[in-house]
Image (cartoon, grey):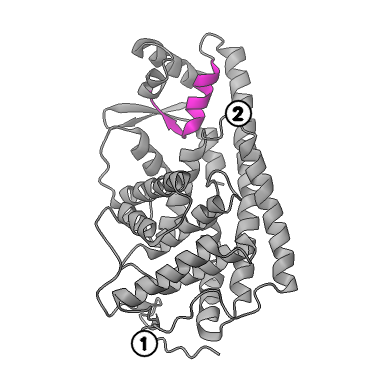
């Protein structure tokens, strides 16, 4: 039994692996269905002619949802316009979401070069998210409270203690091969959140680590899952699951929750991906028939890379002179494929049907 006092630093947070039955029949059954759904999504991504085409959109959607969990709210319009437009956006929420998206890429590129998840990588991620020089928490007195202001958890205190817990987590993530990777991912996520190594940005860093672990375990070639969406819609059960481990050493509920998150988001991600591909193929065929002089495979790809595009995007991939590509975009708007929007002094073009799929 864990003897836990929510008002005192949890320096006795048990090291990994946990002393508990982590592979019950229910958990193993759920692991099979979650793994199958994830494999189907990964297979679909692998079979794309250009797997990187939708990555910016996927990462921005994940960044938006993960930030929303921390009450950092922005709209799809503000977010995608901020990425495409030259205008500098003063919206701090939009800036934080874009920084989060950049942190996903940072982690992904790190694993391509060096397939290990380390404490130093976690520090790099949080610094990218927060756009500062944050490091491991050194100031005592950190507590987590509920909406009523009541303390519900006090994470470990003291830099040395935190670093020792993180070193143990590092070893578990990179070296433990005795557990199914999805079960291991769930355990690692709890432990990172319980250690709470940073003054701010722990939740967002922890959710990026979920994607990176799937990559590390070769379960998902490209981190292309909207995992945070699931947490938004099932937030109470997420926190109940975390508390059950801390207070009762009951891992079952949280592991099942995390497995269901992977399964549900994989199924939805595959459906969303198929919808975008179908729309892209249909749109391409319609442009070819109605605007044969405008059509090219590269043009169709650029208007599906992000919901908003602009003249410079077409110039960058050498589709023509500024005047030529400007005429292309005007023709696409006249035929109803795009809708122009003025942002500052720029004119952006919105792929409304793509945006509707993303907002489902």
What residue does disc 2 label?
49
Dominant SS type (magenta): helix
**Local secondary structure at mark 2:** loop
Image position of 202 with respect to 101: above or below: below
Report the residue that reaches farthest toward the top. 293
- In this rendering, the answer to whether 9 lies above or below 175 is below
- Considering depth in this image, is 117 or 47 the residue closer to the camera? 117
Residue visible at 65% across and 56% down in the picture:
263
- Residue at 45% x, 15% y: name it: 328
Instruction: Please name the residue that numbered disc 1 is placed on.
Output: 8
| Percent position of residue 142, x then y | 31, 77
Q: Is residue 60 visible?
A: no
In space, the residues marked 2 and 1 are separated at their CA atoms by 54 Å
Within 10 Å of disc 2 (Cα), the crowding (few <14, some 14-19, many 20+) is few
Counting residues from the N terminus, which is met first, the one under dot 2 or under dot 1?
Answer: 1
* Quarter the N terminus occupies: bottom right
Quadrant for residue 69, please give it: bottom left
Estimate the x, y position of residue 112 in percent, counting from the top left: 47, 44
User: Whole-percent x and y of residue 13?
Assistant: 45, 81
Q: Which residues are magenta?
A: 296-310
Left or right: 85 as drawn, with respect to 325: left
Around disc 1, counting alpha carbons within 10 Å, would you say few (fewer than 14), some (14 to 19), or many (20 or more)? some
């Amino acid at each position: 039994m864990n003897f836990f006092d929510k008002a005192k630093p949890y320096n006795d947070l048990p090291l990994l692996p946990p002393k508990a039955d982590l592979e019950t029949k229910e958990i193993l059954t759920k692991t099979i269905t979650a793994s199958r759904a994830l494999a189907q999504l990964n297979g679909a991504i692998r079979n794309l002619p250009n797997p990187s085409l939708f990555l910016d959109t996927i990462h921005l959607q994940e960044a938006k949802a993960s930030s929303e969990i921390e009450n950092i709210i922005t709209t799809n319009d503000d977010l995608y316009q901020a990425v495409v437009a030259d205008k500098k956006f003063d919206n701090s929420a939009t800036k934080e979401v874009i920084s989060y998206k950049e942190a996903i890429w940072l982690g992904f590129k790190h694993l391509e070069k060096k397939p290990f998840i380390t404490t130093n990588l976690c520090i790099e991620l949080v610094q990218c998210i927060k756009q500062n020089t944050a490091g491991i928490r050194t100031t005592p007195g950190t507590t987590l409270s509920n909406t009523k202001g009541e303390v519900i958890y006090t994470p470990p205190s003291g830099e040395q203690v935190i670093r020792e817990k993180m070193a143990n987590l590092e070893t578990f993530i990179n070296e433990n091969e005795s557990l199914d990777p999805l079960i291991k991912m769930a355990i690692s996520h709890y432990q990172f959140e319980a250690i709470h190594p940073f003054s701010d940005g722990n939740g967002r860093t922890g959710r990026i680590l979920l994607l990176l672990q799937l990559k590390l375990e070769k379960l998902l070639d490209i981190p292309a899952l909207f995992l945070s969406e699931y947490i938004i819609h099932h937030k109470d059960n997420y926190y109940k699951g975390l508390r059950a481990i801390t207070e009762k050493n009951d891992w079952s509920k949280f592991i099942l929750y995390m497995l269901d998150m992977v399964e549900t988001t994989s199924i939805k991600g595959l459906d969303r991906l198929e919808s975008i591909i179908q729309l892209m193929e249909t749109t391409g065929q319609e442009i070819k028939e109605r605007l044969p002089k405008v059509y090219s495979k590269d043009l169709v790809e650029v208007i599906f890379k992000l919901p908003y595009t602009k003249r410079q995007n077409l110039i960058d991939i050498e589709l023509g002179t500024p005047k030529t590509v400007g005429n292309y975009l005007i023709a696409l708007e006249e035929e109803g494929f795009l809708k122009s929007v003025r942002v500052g002094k720029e004119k952006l073009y919105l792929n409304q049907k793509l945006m509707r799929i993303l907002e489902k």
